[in-house]
Amino acid sequence: MGKYIVKRFIMMIATILIIASLTFVLMHLIPGSPFDGERTTNPTIQANLEKFYKLDQPLHIQYLSYLKSIVTFDFGPSIKKPNESVNELLARGFPISFELGMATILVALLSGIILGTIASLRHNGLVDYFAMTFAVVGISVPNFVLATLLIQQLAVKWDLLPAATWSSPLHMILPIIALATGPTAIIARLTRSSMLEVLTQDYIKMARAKGLSPARIIVRHALRNALMPVVTILGTMLAGILTGTFVIERIFAIPGMGKYFVESINNRDYPVIMGTTVFYSAFLVFMLFIVDIAYGLLDPRIKLHRKEGDA
Amino acid sequence: MNKHQLDHAKEQIKERMDEVDKSLPVGTSVMQKNRKKTKKVRSDIKVLQVNNLQVSFRTYGGEVEAVRGVSFNLHQGETLAIVGESGCGKSVTSNAIMGLIPQPAGIIKNGSVLFKGKELTSMSKSQLRKIQGVDISMIFQDPMTALNPTLTIGEQLTEGLRTHKRVSKQEAKQKAIEMLELVGIPNPTERLKQFPHQFSGGMRQRIVIAIALICEPELLIADEPTTALDVTIQAQILELFEEIQQKTNISIILITHDLGVVAKIADRIAVMYAGKIVEIGDKRAIFYTPEHPYTKGLLNSVPRLDLVGEELQPIEGTPPDLFSPPKGCPFTARCPYAMEVCEHVYPFTKAISESHAVDCWLQDERAKALQELS
Ligand SMILES: Nc1ncnc2c1ncn2[C@@H]1O[C@H](COP(=O)(O)OP(=O)(O)OP(=O)(O)O)[C@@H](O)[C@H]1O
Ligand code: SF4
Ligand SMILES: [Mg+2]
């Protein structure tokens, strides 16, 4: 186990470095610079600014100091908002985005699994058809469309829920619904099909032959096996939700990282782009690692470590 | 019956023949020897009485009449083998007894299953659960898929016990260790913590047997328990069955394609064809004086002691479609003795002796008279 974690950790570092380097290359491939605003800046001032942010130095030197900033996790001040450091932006925005993302994944997991399970138990029944229709719609409608629809209907027309910001649990409902519907639908479909398969397995029949209660058979024998594929897609789903938060935050005017991230790219605010990208990739890589560990814990056949031979 | 099984049967029978040659005077049969060894006295207590059981499945193509009126009794401590070609309804029969017919497609259309006098077919699901795994247990064909891959052996062994009987965790664990010892698994205490993938196929089938027996049931239904195992392991598992039966006096219904297995451990044999039991009787009667042409065909398709070296004669043709089973004897199309009446009317069950019955028109006095004439 320890050996596996060390190996994974080294791979995680390598992954983050590759992502960081790619970001650096891409960033400098995009034409434009932080000082390309509508107002033309005085050339001397611009030169001084570039000197201050070390943009006048050759690219490989910039790259090295970028790597250094990653290692020390200090990305310096933002170019557009010089009185704020990238770390401060992250500390302010990320917790909100994290809240939104985590709430979304929890809601999606819970409702998706329940919906999928019920659908599989009522295979070809009314509930099944209803759930799968919902799933198809949920997967096909993009979250920004759904978000707009929700605001228009539930917030503006019916005045049931607040339309924007992140100031109370009530405010969180619409953005979470908007972001969670797609993943819920995917999880529900996956749970259903994998449950249907598991329910035909011999060990389920054997559990029935033991005279166990239906609840015990479903939870202990069926679901545990049926959820393996769900755990597998959780990693990619997390990435999707993470980028989804950027969009949803803009629509609902939520002061999370999304706002800063999009602005920073428009503005070529190099330190912010680099800081958030590295931070987010590190976060995602770490979550994937957690998912892998969870998978190993759920399925004893997957060995995270070498053990004595078989019987 | 596939090639592998045939080879196996051949091997087993030859083996036993050699044994006999050494120990018995010429002309004495293997069967007699086996009886001497086990020397069971049949108990009068009927554990199971199945009467005119009919099971159908509703499918898109129509209704499949999988079991069409099956009747038999099973005594305490007895092993009844149900044999017959694939698709003849062996598994459906056993699932119906166990209350495990897949819903909602499967329906028990008629008949009764009395377990120690209690009617099972009319029981509610929750009443049935008090019997499943406690009084009646079941073993499945493939030990590789019968165990849940994500639960430890210990959890799978004890959960039935903990559900049905008031025992502490510690007591359950102790019982589980005893059971693993009984079925011959070494180091049971450590093995309890392991997962199914850490065991070989034969070991897993032993564990499945241990799970089936942990609540000390009175009836064990084994649906092809050795088919998925290789020959040496098969023999070991069969010995285990015999040993357990001697210790616990459990009744066993053994479903199999394999006449070698039947010859080894059955007391009585029921031959099924197209959803019906066409012949039932003591092992000796079925092996030595089979009356139904289908039984004779089955026996001819396996190497016989007295016919070693002769060609096997598999039964030609295929069983009838159970979507619209024939009105008369379902074997008509394949039967070398078929008569006009066979096609139209199903034969009566004729009791040849107290323990031997057959469904065939050849048993009718008129047919007999006809045969003598020709
Ligand atoms: N769930 C089901 N739905 C529809 N038909 C079924 C179902 N289960 C069994 N049958 C049908 O019932 C008949 C008897 O099947 P069964 O499984 O009892 O055969 P079997 O004698 O056990 O054969 P095998 O030796 O291959 O296991 C077959 O014709 C099969 O197609
Ligand atoms: S009833 Fe007729 S067809 Fe059926 S087995 Fe007997 S002789 Fe053959
Ligand atoms: Mg079967």
Image (cartoon, rainbow, N blue to C red):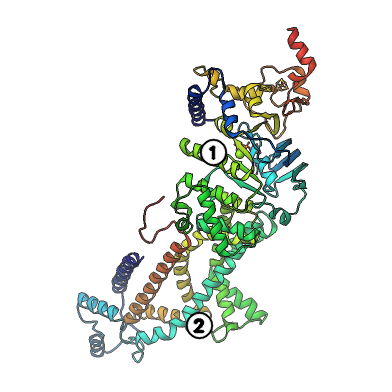
- Tell me how many marks there are: 2
Answer yes or no: is residue A17 visible. yes
- Residue drawn at x 36%, y 73% is A282
- Vertical relation: B236 (above or below) A175: above
Q: Residue at x 58, y 56 (%)?
A: A195
Does residue B229 appear left or right of residue A71 in this picture?
Answer: right
Asked if disc 2 and disc 1 are in contact, CB closer than 8 Å, the reply is no
Quarter containing the N terminus of chain A = bottom left
| Rendered view: A134 above or below B118 | below
Q: Amino acid at mark 2?
A: Ile
Left or right: B274, with A189 as reference point: right
Can you give x and y, in whole percent of width and height, for residue A150 in the image? 61, 75
- Helix, strand or loop at label 2? It is loop
- Horizontal and vertical percent position of residue A40: 31, 86
Does label 1 lie on the same chain as label 2?
no
Asked which quadrant contains residue B76, the reply is top right
Residue B204, image x, y percentages: 50, 48
Query: Which residue is at the front of the view, A55 or A22?
Result: A22
Q: Chain of mark 2?
A: A
> Residue B238 — which label?
1
Distance from the alpha carbon under mark 2 to that under mark 1: 70 Å
